[in-house]
Image: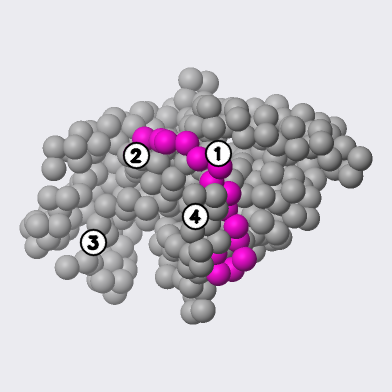
Amino acid sequence: MALDERARLRLERKACRLGDPVARLRYLQHQMQRLGAKKAPLLRTRFVLPASLVLLLYWAAPTGSSAGRPLLSGSARLSPPAGAAIWVVQESQECELYSNGLRIELAWRAAGEPRRPRWLARRPSGHAWPTDPAGIVFHASESDTAPFRAELNERLKREGESLLSWVRRHKLYHYVVDRFGRVYRILGDQERAHHAGQSLWADADFIYFDLNESFLGVCLEACTTGPDPPALTAAQIQAARLLVQMLRARYGFSPANCVTHAQVSVNPLNGLIGYHSDWADGFPFESLGLPDNYAQPLPSLLLFGFEADTGFMQRAGPRLREVVEAARQEVSRQALNRGLTPAEYRRRLAEQYRQALRSVADMQQRRQSL
């Protein structure tokens, strides 16, 4: 049976009283082994973290910030609120109609490959393998867009079709929302889209690597690289809001797991975030019925020692810059507590990242053998 909340909190309090990290790790190993013996049938279908990662990913995970915001997202899975049920009203070869008014066009549907989620659990739990999408990554097409005016209607339609053709050919996103507010399904929700590249996100339950495998990619036809702030049309915002409603009702993931590409993109070769920086600013979270997720801490900085360079900080909006600065202060504080310089501590975190990737690869091999 799963570890109940009271028992988990009791275990956490006991572990935190042990000042010596080695003693804390030994205590956790003993308790996890004891719990594992009681849950042997379940653990045959789960991956057990290597002991060297337990402290980093669970007990040593930060729980507060100097900015006064929590450093962990909420639970990955939430039950949809009462009255939030959304269902398919009508389905044909051309489209799907949903009870909240969402219409999804199917003319550009492509055949994809099954997703293979890559994640590590952050805490002992009785959860089964999470196979449904864990969240949404929002993208901008970064394509050339004409002014949204009636006299340019034919050009606007050609631009939209050109984008859809490119996305379908390369299987880039699960959904595209064009400037007229039409939602197109490109790939099925259980298929892998090539939308996020090297990427990383975390909530209180899991750390997700390679979000192509575990998050849905939603692309809005827009360009965020010009001198003017990106502007979505009213039709796009309305359609995207309905799409988010449907996906959250269907899969029950937390609104905190609905983030932009700039928040999750990383480059392991140089240790920097923001290899892709679309929607580093200006994404209308609130208009889509979501919290201001720009205020969320970046797991790449806090857990694995990635950094933000000057280029990223120039592209990022004020809220995202504030989050980066708060993470830098938190990393410095943790380094000081360990008698290390921030650079030394980030190198240790970077090694933990490499070890986590090896653990994920091992996890996938075990899953395939089950």
Q: Under tag 2, what secondary structure?
A: loop
Q: Under tag 1, what secondary structure?
A: loop
Q: What residue type is labelled 1?
A: Trp
Q: Residue 119 carries which label?
A: none
User: Could you tell which of marks 3 and 4 lies nearer the N-terminus?
Assistant: 4
Distance of mark 1 from mark 4, alpha carbons?
A: 14 Å
Residue 283: x %, y % from top left:
70, 48
Q: Which residue is drawn at 49% across and 46% down?
A: 216
Which marked residue is nearer to the observer: mark 3 or mark 1? 1
Distance of mark 3 from mark 2, alpha carbons?
A: 25 Å
Vertical placement of residue 59 versus 171, above or below: below
Residues marked 3 and 4 touching at CB (< 8 Å): no
User: Could you tell which of marks 3 and 1 lies nearer the N-terminus?
Assistant: 1
User: Could you tell which of marks 1 and 4 lies nearer the N-terminus?
Assistant: 4
Q: What residue type is labelled 2?
A: Pro
342 drawn magenta: no
User: Could you tell which of marks 2 and 1 lies nearer the N-terminus?
Assistant: 1
- The part of the image, by quadrant, that contains residue 98 is bottom right
Residues marked 3 and 1 touching at CB (< 8 Å): no
Q: In this view, does 34 lie to the left or right of 217?
A: left
Residue 212: x %, y % from top left:
45, 37
Q: Which mark is residue 92?
A: 4
Q: Is residue 286 left or right of residue 205?
A: right
Main SS of the magenta part reads loop
Q: Which residue is drawn at 84% across and 40% down?
A: 153
- Residue 63 vs residue 270, the one in the foreground: 270
- Report the number of discs: 4
Q: Which amino acid does label 4 sit on?
A: Ser
